[in-house]
Amino acid sequence: MEENTIFLTKVSQLFIENGAKTLTMDDIAKAFGISKKTLYVKYKNKEELIEEVLHFKLEEIIARLKYLDQTIQNAIERMFCRDEEMDNVADSNNTILIKQLIKYYPAIFNKHMIEFSDKFAEVLVHNIEKGREQGLYRTNFDAEVYSKLFFQLIMSMENPLYVDPSTINKVYYKHEIMSMYMNAITNEKGKQILKNLNY
């Protein structure tokens, strides 16, 4: 593992455990046994470091999703594996890091979520293309639009604008999102697989 990856892995955990606002550059320097001056040579401010950490964690998530794309051939079965993966991603929104990003660094958080949406959409479009090749998905819808809509829906439970999360069971909510999305994109052949999966 290269030096920068080791650094970002450890500093990411520090941010997750302590929060974007709470963790200081002094804390980070002490954790690595370096001077704050040395840290500022690499990063001009904490905001720059936070952005690199978010990009690093996003690349980890996307790499995991792409790995599953390569190992699970059936497009529909792959989507239900993604459901479990996205549970982990959505649950991470409850961390102190994300809560403090939203409150104290909204511009950085919004930039991160746009990048997340774009990267995730690429993975999802690939799944749609594979499903069409396998004769499981409809061909008469815009794959990019649907992928963006799915991302918005799957993340809405953790950052709701018009939904009171206390009134809806999270597991049921996510199940219904997946059911709605998959029934919207599958053709009759695909729906037979969904039926076998109780969707």
Image (spheres, rainbow, N blue to C red):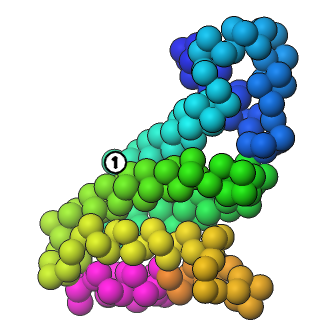
Q: Does residue 77 show up?
A: no
Question: Does the magenta portion include 183?
Answer: yes
Location of residue 79 in the rendering, given as x and y in whole percent from the top left corner: 41, 67
Amino acid identity at mark 1 = Gln
Location of residue 68 in the rendering, given as x and y in whole percent from the top left corner: 42, 51
The residue to which callout 1 is attached is: 70
Q: Residues within 10 Å of mark 1 (few under 14, many from 20)?
A: few
Count of number-bearing discs: 1
> Image height check: is 28 above or below 118?
above
6 lies left or right of 179? right
The region drawn magenta spans 178-199
Location of residue 42 in the rendering, given as x and y in whole percent from the top left corner: 59, 15
Q: For the point 51% across and 39% down, which residue is it?
A: 55
> Image height check: is 117 above or below 169?
above
- In the image, 148 versus 125, the foreground residue is 148
Q: Main secondary structure of the magenta part?
A: helix
Residue 44: name its quadrant: top right
Location of residue 194 in the rendering, given as x and y in whole percent from the top left corner: 39, 84
Q: For the point 77% across and 34% down, which residue is it?
A: 14
90 lies left or right of 77? right
- In the image, 62 versus 131, the foreground residue is 62
Residue 39: name its quadrant: top right
> Image height check: is 127 above or below 142?
above
Question: Does the magenta portion include 77?
Answer: no
The residue tagged with tag 1: helix, strand or loop? helix
Q: For the point 71% across and 27% down, which residue is it?
A: 10
* Quadrant housing the N terminus: top right
